[in-house]
Amino acid sequence: MRRVAVASVTAVSLALGVGIGVQTWTAGERRAAQDAREAARSRVDGALAVVHDDSAVRAAAVAASGTAGAAGLLTDARAALEAAVAQGRETLTASDGQVGADDGPRAALAEQLESAHVSAPTASPALARQLAAAVSAAEQAVHAAVSAEQSRVAAAAQAAQAAQAAQRAASAPRPRASAPAATPDRCATTYSGPAFYTSAPTEGGDGSNGRLPASALTAVSWTRDSRGTPFYLRADAAAALERLNVAFRAALGHDLALDLTYRDLDTQVAMRAALGSVAAVPGTSSHGTGLALDTPELPCAYGWDSAARAWLVAHGPAYGWVSPTWARQNGSNPEYWHYEYRG
Ligand SMILES: [Zn+2]
């Protein structure tokens, strides 16, 4: 339309230009020219009218486009509101039962959603934006409430676990206050009679059982009894025991412990009196000849199932030292502590 109007104006100008240049024409020519001018003016008027119409159309178009722009703004705001409402409804559904005792934030969101729903169809862009913002804010409050509730539940669970652990610890059996007492009991000495000690060589001894002079005896090198008396044995038995102890220490990590070796006659008499038939008849004991030893009567260290006894029974004979048949566990007088030198 605009291009057509411009073309028309150009045509009119050309027609007018033709008329302006005529000054020496005849009357007939001037009339013809006047007619032509009027015709041209008429066409200009027409053309101007077209131009005017075009402007009106353009103004209308501008106005229309302005309306369309406004409509676009409105559409955008309402779409945003609808999106906020849809999201708010999802949050409301998902948070059901997730905010703990205080359902206030969810109630507030529900209220905002209802308000938005009612107002949305007629809301101006500004109101739509305002409602969308309010819905979003209420929704964020619900998210915060859900998050707080989750933290509270997690903390409560942790506290419950701690309480359970504490209860278990409290109800669990004490780390066996009786156990340390039981261990010494089990390992305590199996000897309950009066204390006897190993004997020093018998002064003026005649070499008979329980009457051995110092010349017949040799003390072992690594230990003495609790009163400080050396452990005496016949010289060859003592020498063999020295070698045995070296091997024993290598295998067990410690020296062989001794309780009694040589025992003089007086001590044997006293022992027989105290212990009865468990002690040998005085004058017959292998301790009286310096050919016997007793380990401590400690069942854990030297008892039937101890590593020390197992080693002594297995390796002692190589050094001439044996556990006599009568002293074995199934023997006539079981004594796990008693060993004899047989050479
Ligand atoms: Zn013995």
Image (spheres, rainbow, N blue to C red):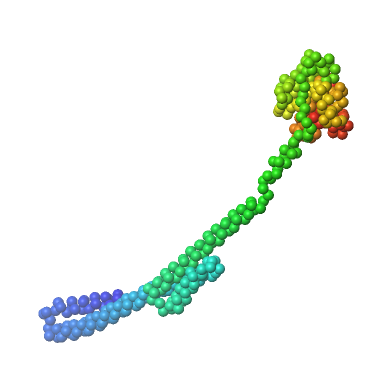
Say if 108 sits above or below 228 in the image: below
Quarter of the rendering containing residue 301: top right
Give above or below for 207 relative to 330: above
Between 17 and 46, the one nearer to me in the picture: 46
x and y percent of residue 94 in the render? 54, 68
Tell which residue pokes out farthest to the left in this image.
24
Q: Residue at x 74, y 36 (%)?
A: 188
Q: Residue at x 83, y 22 (%)?
A: 265
In the foreground, 249 or 11: 249
Q: Position of residue 266 (x, y in %)?
A: 81, 22
Q: Position of residue 121 (x, y in %)?
A: 43, 78
- Residue at the image position 20 percent from the left and 82 percent from the top: 41
Quarter the C terminus occupies: top right
Q: Please, which residue is most extreme toward the right here?
A: 332
232 relative to 165 in the view: left or right? right
Q: Is residue 229 visible?
A: yes
- Residue 36 spot, x, y in % from top left: 19, 83
At horizontal 87% and vertical 34% (from top left) the residue drawn is 330
Residue 182 figure quarter: top right
Whether 141 is drawn above or below 267: the answer is below
User: Observer-nearest residue: 332 or 97?
Assistant: 332
One can see residue 247 in this view: no
| The N terminus sits in image quarter | bottom left
Q: Give the mark count.
A: 0
